[in-house]
Amino acid sequence: MNLRLVPALLVLGAALSACNPVGSPPQRTFSVSGHGEARAAPDIAMVSTGVRTQGATAKEALQRNTAAMSEVFKAIKALGIADKDVQTSNFSVQPIYEPYREGQVNPQRIVGYQVFNQVTATVRDLARLGEALDTFVSAGSNELQGISFSIDKADPLRDEARTAAIKDALHKAEIMTKAAGVKLGRLVTMSESGGGRPMPAAPMAMARAEKSVPIAAGEQVLDADVQLTYEIE
């Protein structure tokens, strides 16, 4: 053996002995997962609405769209929706082709253009959501892409879901160690994965304004998943 390697090997051997003393049993651990949920009624709604127009030329289609969208923006402002709660979410200009004929050899001819402009508006007063939908359509919106609900200040609910997830994991750990005839030791690691986003649940309430579209606001669910690792004594 190369004598110059002997001191290094002695140091490495001492370090390994210190980390895992001879004769000491290996650390026994097990992991358990927990899931928690918190529920609440949503307090805001995001409405995606817009205008789709056509014209013989791109300029004509765009002019028509601009005029119609200007009215939609006026309606949004009249509802008291703040500028920060309105955002353009889609805008496109596309050609319109003549219908394809069976056996056609020549490329399809462009016969016009289509312009689509869409905004997403956040309605913070759900009691006026039906009224808002009526107003958008009356102002000239001919495209309603969807409505989604959420919770404006969701952090307290997220914390509630995390607490429930940890309690769920701890309960499982206590049940499992008791059934296995071992003692639960100290907590080694703890981590969170996924969850945290408001998700729709079963309908719970109806947001309705006088003479307007009835809308089911429902209920939002925020969930959390954790994983705990314990020593076994």
Image (cartoon, rainbow, N blue to C red):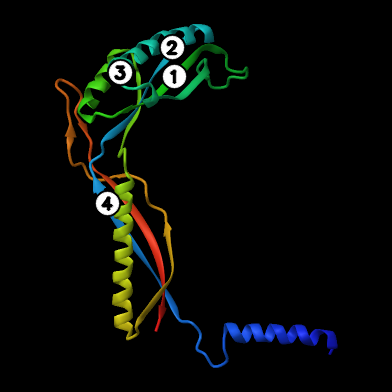
Pointer 1: what residue? 117
Question: What SS does tag 4 mark?
Answer: strand
- Front-most of residues 84 and 114: 84
Q: Earlier in the sequence, mark 3 or mark 1?
A: 1
Relative placement, left or right, of 61 versus 82 is: right
Question: What SS does tag 3 mark?
Answer: helix
Q: Earlier in the sequence, mark 2 or mark 3?
A: 2
The answer for how far apart the CA atoms under marks 2 and 4 are is: 43 Å
Inspect the image, locate mark 3, and give the three-letter code of the amino acid beneath it: Phe
Residue shown at the point (29%, 81%) measured from the top left: 178
Q: Marks 1 and 4: in contact by CB < 8 Å? A: no
Relative placement, left or right, of 20 versus 27 is: right
Q: Earlier in the sequence, mark 2 or mark 4?
A: 4
- Front-most of residues 63 and 150: 150
Q: Marks 3 and 2: in contact by CB < 8 Å? A: no
Relative placement, left or right, of 123 versus 18 is: left
> Residue 38, which numbered label?
4
Name the image quarter holding the C terminus: bottom left
Q: Earlier in the sequence, mark 2 or mark 1?
A: 2
Q: Earlier in the sequence, mark 3 or mark 4?
A: 4
Residue shown at the point (29%, 14%) measured from the top left: 78
Disc 1 residue crowd, few under 14, some 14–19, many 20+, Cα 10 Å: many
Disc 2 residue crowd, few under 14, some 14–19, many 20+, Cα 10 Å: many
Residue 142 image offset from top left, x and y in percent: 35, 18
Residue shown at the point (29%, 65%) measured from the top left: 167
> Residue 136, which numbered label?
3
Q: Marks 1 and 2: in contact by CB < 8 Å? A: yes
Inspect the image, locate mark 4, and give the three-letter code of the amino acid beneath it: Ala
